[in-house]
Image: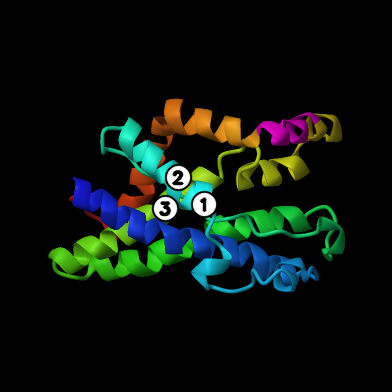
Amino acid sequence: MFYSLLLFFVIIIPSAIIHEYFHGWTADALGDPTAKRFGRLTLNPLAHIDPWGTFILPIILLLLSGGSFVFAYAKPVPFNPYNLKYPKWGPALVAIAGPLANLLVAIVFGLLVRFYPMNNFSLVLSVIVYANILLAVFNLVPLPPLDGSKILYVLLPSQWAERLYSLERYGMIIVLFFVFFAFEILSPIIWLIYGLIVGRPLLF
């Protein structure tokens, strides 16, 4: 189990970097060069590593869970919504780009797993699929400051969107609470998507 979690940790970091890169790429494509200006429109890990989310939080989760759970994320890519071509839908498009990028990675590697004999290499590919589905599903949870909340903002009436946005200041507390006490509600969704893509269970 420990080595499987270590493999998961090694995989989820570049997966989180891909997630953040595509936020920046989408914002840039929609007219906002903020990510490029801050040197974040790159796949270089050094530009995206967040000491807390990339190292400290995973270690804490690993210790508190007794070695049964680990999660990590990269430093959020900055963007200026006022520069986007579509003032209302632009932020939602930027938000959904990260999860969609992870889902695309999961599909590509998942198809390889589906048609590849089960061995140690296919196990590594399977963990890549699982990690990217996890990132996609988790980030689409409609809680600030996750991507799902950015999408929800444009769907809610303005007064409700403002109330939801006001919770952004408590973002880290909200995310930690969810990870520690409610993360399991995502498991059926993650495994459903994994099964649809790969067609067989993950053995780790």
**Tag 3 or tag 2, which sits nearer the N-term?**
2
The N terminus sits in image quarter:
top left
Tell me: 164 left or right of 18: right
Rendered image quadrant of residue 32: bottom right
Relative to 29, is 174 above or below?
above
Please tell me whether mark 3 sits on a helix, a strand or a loop.
helix
Magenta span of residues: 163-170
Q: Which residue is mark 1?
A: 51
Residue 156 locus on image (x, y percent): 76, 36
Tell me: 123 left or right of 58: left
Rendered image quadrant of residue 97: bottom right
Relative to 143, is 113 above or below?
below
Q: Which mark is residue 133?
A: 3
**Which amino acid type is shown beneath numbered disc 2?**
Ile
Q: Is residue 150 visible?
A: yes
Question: Which of 91 and 145 lies nearest the eye of the viewer?
Answer: 145
CA–CA distance in space, label 2 to label 3:
22 Å
